[in-house]
Amino acid sequence: MTQERDEIAVVGAGLAGCLLACFLAHRGYPVALYERRPDPRSGTPERGRSINLALSERGLDALRRIGLVEQVMADALPMRGRMVHPVNGAPGLQPYSSSGDLAINSIGRGALNNALLEAAAKLPGVRIAFDHRLVGLDPATGTMTFETPQGTATARARVVLGADGAGSAVRGQLLAHDLVTESVDFLDYGYKELTIPPLGGDFALDPGALHIWPRGTSMMIALPNPDRSFTCTLFWPTHGTASFASLGSAAAIERHFAQHYPDLPPIAPNLVDDYQHNPVGVLGTVRCDPWQVDGRVALLGDAAHAIVPFYGQGANCAFEDVVELDRCLDECAGDWSAALPLFQHRRQDNAEAIARMALANFVEMRDKVGSPVFRARKQVEHALERALPGRYVSQYELVSFSTVPYAQVRRRVRRQYQVVGLAAAGLVAVAGAVVASALRRRG
């Protein structure tokens, strides 16, 4: 049956593209997976570009559907809360869930990508072409032009699916044909990676938490790795006196970290070298419309809706895209001209919802997690969850530990806050009436 169907092209062999190839192959489609880079399984990772992932329920749900979750989770490290590092004093743990036992999972992007790539390569009907950079696409015919080490190559596919990231070449081709509109909103912040190696053969920090150093206008996070190291990521302004550009010399770097991150230099012996040589990445939100053209070319994952990483949902959201597209193909009996518009209809509001929540969570992580008021609010929220199980669920738990659509999460959380606000106002009114009555009796 697979030989009777036209080939489906997936451009981009990153996380979303490899997962998509697996889902399509399981449906019986022949798949051509094109990647501009060499085979990542045979190379070394680019310095300062690992960006650990926080894999949570939406991503795990997708992996379960193709039987990969146990293999992937074998190398994952569960993180049950945020370990907040103040400038002065001891770090404190803030659990993610009211029970304290729910966890997001730290996993290296490269390891996950390789596992998905291996899974796709083993499936019948999947062929993978590395060193193929898309430079031309005719959306009407599905004809693609690639630059390769051997010269120009062309291929044709019944359907072309762009899963090639925030800088998507497929989206670029659709823009060149005036078939989509695009907006890219960059933050005035960038990111840079540092490394905390094992200390005495063990983790230098608690591996059961996501570590965060909130500093108001900037922050650093650290996620554990299976080799007992931590990957740290600085999120700093790109301009100004407290920016990446403001630290030039080794002495200035050492002074800055000793003042603002005093517990880091003793456990990060390569701090200065990492800082001076690791690149600064950009952060932004990509929006485009439409996500598909004539049921023949479509975008998904970051290619359609890249978001900032502050909710740990970029890969999880992209994986959920793949699940939804698979569901749409089921409901449309494999009719791509019906399934692709339905996919956009189902996912676009959800993508916008998580984009907004991710931006808001940056402010929470950077400015609020160290605040006593924030900690008290979280304690109240967890108490409500325990008192009203299933009826009151925090936004973080709905996003990270469920598959409730993101847009529904936002609506539900707004309703919860309204109810809690009314209840609190009622309690204040009752307390005020009691006090007033008591005062009248005394008078």
Image: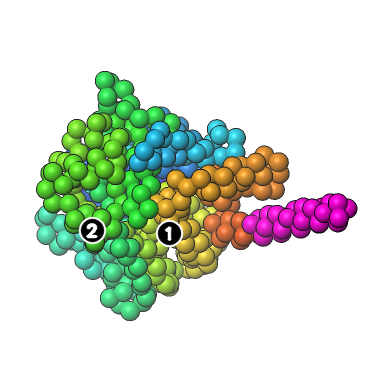
Q: Amino acid at mark 2?
A: Thr
Within-10-Å neighbours for mark 1: few <14, some 14–19, many 20+ = some
Residue 200 in the figure: left or right of residue 272: right
Q: Residue furthest right?
A: 441
In this rendered view, identify the residue nearer to me: 409 or 153.
409
Q: Residue 47 placed where, x, y %?
A: 19, 44
N-terminal of the pair, mark 1 or mark 2, is 2
Within-10-Å neighbours for mark 2: few <14, some 14–19, many 20+ = few
Residue 73 in the figure: left or right of residue 153: right
Count of number-bearing discs: 2
Q: Residue 175 placed where, x, y %?
A: 31, 74
Front of the two marks 1 and 2: 2
Q: Residue furthest bottom?
A: 178
What residue is rendered at 36% in x and 49% in y? 215
- Which residue carries the number 2 mark? 241
Tell me where residue 222 sits by quadrant: top left
Q: Residue furthest front?
A: 443
What residue is rendered at 37% in x and 63% in y? 285
Marks 1 and 2: CB-CB under 8 Å? no
In space, the residues marked 1 and 2 are separated at their CA atoms by 23 Å
- Tell me the element at label 1: helix
Q: Is residue 242 visible?
A: yes
Q: Is residue 112 visible?
A: no
- Tell me the element at label 2: loop
Q: Which mark is residue 423?
A: none
Q: Amino acid at mark 1?
A: Leu
* Range shown magenta: 416-443
Q: Is residue 243 magenta?
A: no
Q: Main secondary structure of the magenta part?
A: helix
- Which residue carries the number 1 mark? 359
